[in-house]
Image (spheres, rainbow, N blue to C red):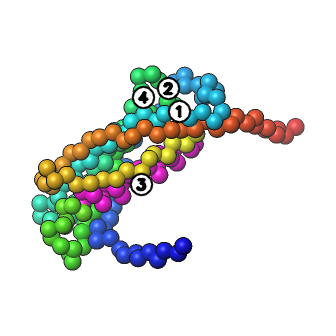
Amino acid sequence: MTVQTHVSLSPLRLNRYFLKSLNFSLHEGYDWGKVPDGVEIEIPALQIGVVTSQNPDNERQWRIELDLDLAEPPEKNFPYKFAATMVGIFTIDSRFPKEKIEHLANVAGPSFLYGTARDMISAITNRSPFPPLILQSAVFSAEKDNPSPTTKRVGASQPKQLKAKPKRARKVAMKK
């Protein structure tokens, strides 16, 4: 079956984004060798926080901050721990309806930043001795109970599994 997809540019324009903070470490003493090949280990819950703020001088400009925190579980049975904060500066197209601006900023802005952070964490963990961590996709939604331009939403993602790779011996050739 062929499905024709319509693509249009988003009215939310990214002006710039940056990594505000990053704290990443491997769990000291974690032994992946104790995990049998093919066995999946549970990824601890990821805490996600979002703060959005509207420019008081321009209602179409927004600053969005996304916090991610994967703390070390009490059982110390996961190889990674990290905390990261991404910041994005966005402008909403002048043709976009005024009454929908806040909703767009609170949903599309964090979604963009999460995808960027997700890729960054995958790249960092891919260069470790353990399997890369690919965070589960997230869906952001605006809360109707708090229509303020500055909101804070914190939640935990559902645990996912990280599968043990089969162990392979490496051969290293040395010049004589």
> Quick check: is 118 in the magenta stretch?
yes
Residue count near mark 4 (Cα–Cα under 10 Å), binned few <14, some 14–19, many ≥20: some
Residue 21 is situated, as x and y percent measured from the top left of the image, at 36, 43
Query: Can residue 130 be spotted in the picture?
Result: no
At a point 54% along the width and 73% down the height, the residue shown is 1
The quadrant holding residue 108 is bottom left
Upstream in the sequence, badge 4 or badge 2? 4
Instruction: Indicate the amino acid at tag 4.
Output: Glu
Q: CA distance from mark 3 to mark 4?
A: 22 Å
Left/right placement of residue 118 relative to residue 142 reads right
Kindly check if marks 1 and 2 are in contact, taking CB atoms under 8 A apart as contact.
yes
Query: Can residue 145 be spotted in the picture?
Result: yes
Q: CA distance from mark 4 to mark 1?
A: 14 Å
The quadrant holding residue 14 is bottom left
Magenta residue span: 105-127
> Quick check: is 34 in the magenta stretch?
no
Quadrant of the snapshot with the C terminus: top right
Q: CA distance from mark 3 to mark 2?
A: 27 Å
Most common secondary structure along the magenta stretch: helix
Closer mark to the observer between disc 1 and disc 2: 1
| Residue position for label 4 | 72
Closer mark to the observer between disc 4 and disc 1: 1
At a point 14% along the width and 50% down the height, the residue shown is 145
The quadrant holding residue 75 is top left
Residue 121 is situated, as x and y percent measured from the top left of the image, at 47, 45
Residue 103 is situated, as x and y percent measured from the top left of the image, at 21, 61
| Residue position for label 2 | 77
Upstream in the sequence, badge 3 or badge 1? 1
Residue count near mark 2 (Cα–Cα under 10 Å), binned few <14, some 14–19, many ≥20: some
| Residue position for label 1 | 41
Q: Which element carries disc 1, helix, strand or loop?
A: strand
| Residue position for label 3 | 116
